[in-house]
Amino acid sequence: MMITVQDFTGVYAEQAFMQELRATAETSKDVRWLNCTKIVGTDCYCDDDAIKEINELIDNAESNSKSESDRNIKNRDNSTSDIAPQPGIHFFDNGNYHYMSKLWTDRVQESFTLIVFDHHPDMQPPRFGGILSCGGWVKEVLENNKFIQNVIIIGVKDELVETVREELSQSGEANILEKVTFIKESELSTLPSIICSDSVNVFSSNLYISIDKDALSPVYAATNWDQGTLTFDALKDSITALTTGRKILGIDICGERAHDFEGDEHHTVQEADSLNSELNRDLVEFLNNL
């Protein structure tokens, strides 16, 4: 799969694997490194100017990739026929930038089910004039993407599910939850059976997967938000079960440590960077073998 890395805070500089990807991007069309550190208006909330700048950055990268692909095809068979777009893996820094999944799914042009691994539901009603946020992007996708069929959110903190239901009820938007299935943190011990049960309906044969690593236990990742208890094996098993016989349209990964992280009760800075680097490597290896 094509890998696109969007560096918003510079945190990837401390991860060996991500620096390998950065070096690969210099010579390979299979990896793109997008420097987003100079774009203002992106931390937690993404304003319209930032959205425009981010989309232009992605458009330019994709245009360059397509031009190179077309050249390769022409050299090979003297034609420039269109090739089917390949699913991509998108890394975009810590959980404050999870709204990037909204921007990436905006590019999808066929029906899909959105699978989200997150310790938070990311369905809060907007608080600042409808501006896109890391805490409300799933709701934005449901309201504005004509191709979305339904959403399955896995690993959500139990009490946050109830909070979202209350908030949406108070704002008169509870009907949006008809398209949402929550698999709460307290249910993770029976996750395999839940995914295979009739209670989890995947309404489309096309899947878009968005992973915030804060759904994982601190044993597996160091993130910038409070974390859940999902294991890495359970994450992989869930993705394997959900994607079997279905088409993957894209896979997003966020949930790095905060750029100003100084250590906590779980990890030193060095431990956090090493852990996250190896997790990102393992995720790429696993996802490329689906």
Image (cartoon, rainbow, N blue to C red):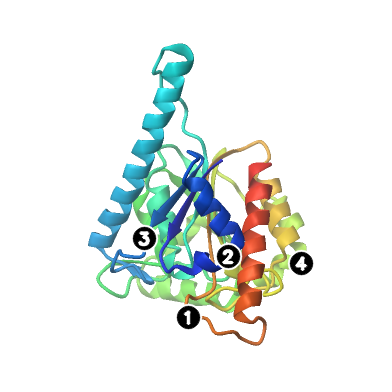
Q: Earlier in the sequence, mark 3 or mark 1?
A: 3
Q: CA distance from mark 3 to mark 1?
A: 17 Å
Q: Real-space Cα distance between discs 1 and 2? A: 15 Å
Viewer-proximal residue, 68 or 59?
68
Q: Which mark is residue 189?
A: 4
* Residue 64 coordinates in the image, percent (x, y): 36, 37
In depth, the one of 277 and 128 nearer the eye is 277
In the rendered image, which residue does mark 1 sit on? 260
> Label 3, on which residue?
36
Disc 2 or 3, which lies upstream in sequence? 2
* Mark number, residue 15: 2
Disc 2 marks a residue whose amino acid type is Gln
In-image side of 38 versus 251 (left or right): left
Can residue 114 be seen? no
Q: Nearer the viewer, mark 2 or mark 4?
A: 2
Amino acid residing under circle 1:
Asp
**Quadrant of the frame with the C terminus:** top right
Q: Secondary structure at mark 3?
A: loop
User: What type is the residue that disc 3 sits on?
Assistant: Cys
| 108, above or below 234, in the image | above
Position of 137 with respect to 21 (left or right) is: left
Q: Nearer the viewer, mark 4 or mark 3?
A: 3
Report the amino acid beneath label 4.
Answer: Ser
